Structure formats: structure tokens, C-alpha cells
Image (cartoon, grey):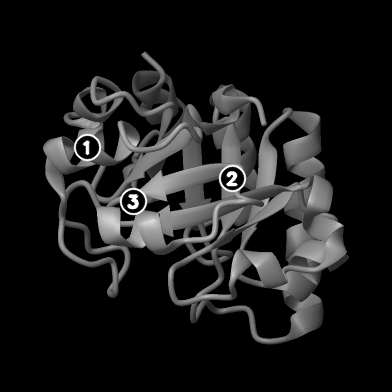
Amino acid sequence: MNKDILRLYLIASSSSFKNPLKDLETAFKAGVTCFQLREKGADIKTDQELLDFALDVKALCSRYNTAFIINDDVLLAEAAEADGIHIGQDDMNPDMLPEYFNDKIIGLSVGNLTELKSSSLSRIAYLGIGPVFSTLSKEDAGEAIGTEGLRKLVNHTKLPTAAIGGITEENYKRCLDSGVDGICVISAITGADNIEQTVTALLQ
């Protein structure tokens, strides 16, 4: 996997923006390198509606050369022909993923050395490490590890890494200085008054 894909990694659901497809296109056009669709308790109700949305997003990602990842939904990832899937510590064992993902991007969340050492990494393409800072975007995110904790985990793996958790325009450089290949953001972009401006700032 090209680790540059992780440089600016946006995570959002179908209801994260006022005008989802328009706002996502703005973000992709401005330079977001990877997008993860994480549909957790969002407004879309049916599987077909979610698939239709995912296919629209996939088309946008293809247009702007943005990697398209699905969070923890094997069927949706396959149906939408996503570039990969991201799983957490409490999700499916990566070794159990179907053959479809053999040549896809598989990401795994880790929050400490214990999780890193106990995880099966043979199929993993990158690690999402965090939460680095406290975050309100994910209720079960766990305790913040800080930039020192981030650096420690980065130094214990040869896999590409992305920092996640409470990352903003004010603190993202501290994460990059810790040795990660990129940053994952949610509210920094979904809550931005000017998406293009924010994306540009996070890529500086």
C-alpha cells in the first residue's frame, strides 16, 4: 500500500454533512487522500439507500483519486467495490475476512501496545492509532494516549500508520512529528465552516 494514501484521511457518515455528496466532493477536490464511510446509527435506514450512497461516494473517490474505505461492513464493502475495509479491536478478526479483501486495503485500529502485540497483522495494510487526544466523535474511543503514546506505537511497527482522535488544525503537526504517515479527522472537516480552507490547512 502507498502510505501517502493516509496523509489526510477523512472519516464520516452519510449524515455528517448538510449536503453530503457536494461537501465530500469539495473535500476530495481540495486534497483529502482517503475517505472512510463509517455508518454508525446514521439517518439512512435501508441497505439499498446505504449502498446507493456508497456507490455515489465511490464514484467521487474515483474521480479525485481518493481511496475509499468502508468501516466494518463486509457486505457493503464488497457490494460497493470499495478499495478496502477498516476494522476495530472488537470487530471481525482480519484473518476471517473473505477473499475479496486479499488485494484490498485492510486497516486496523490499535490504542496501546497490548492491542498491537495481540493483533493478527498478516493481512493488515495500515494501522489507525489512537485516540491521540480526547474526542467526542466516537463514544467508545478509549483513553487518549497523547503524542508520546502515539510515537511509542509507531516505533513498534513497520506498517504505515495514521493518527486518530481529537485531531485539529492546531495539533495535527504534533501527530505528524511523532512519525505517523498521516492523520484521520472527523469533526475538523465535517464541522468546518469552510471545508476547502480546512483541508488545505491540514495538508500544510
Q: Residue tagged by mark 2?
A: 35
Mark 2 touching mark 1, by CB under 8 A? no
Where is residue 75 drawn, in percent x and y? 78, 74
In the image, is 41 to the left or to the right of 95? left
In the image, is 120 to the left or to the right of 53? left
> Is 191 located above or below residue 177 in the figure?
below
Q: CA distance from mark 2 to mark 1?
A: 26 Å
Q: Quadrant of residue 20?
A: bottom right
Q: Mark 2 is on which residue type? A: Phe
Question: Residue drawn 77% across and 53% down?
Answer: 82
Q: CA distance from mark 3 to mark 1?
A: 26 Å
On residue 74, which mark appears?
Answer: none
Mark 3 touching mark 2, by CB under 8 A? no
- Residue sitting farthest toward the top: 204
Q: Mark 3 is on which residue type? A: Ser
SS category of the residue bearing label 2:
strand
Q: Residue tagged by mark 1?
A: 152
On residue 187, which mark appears?
Answer: 3
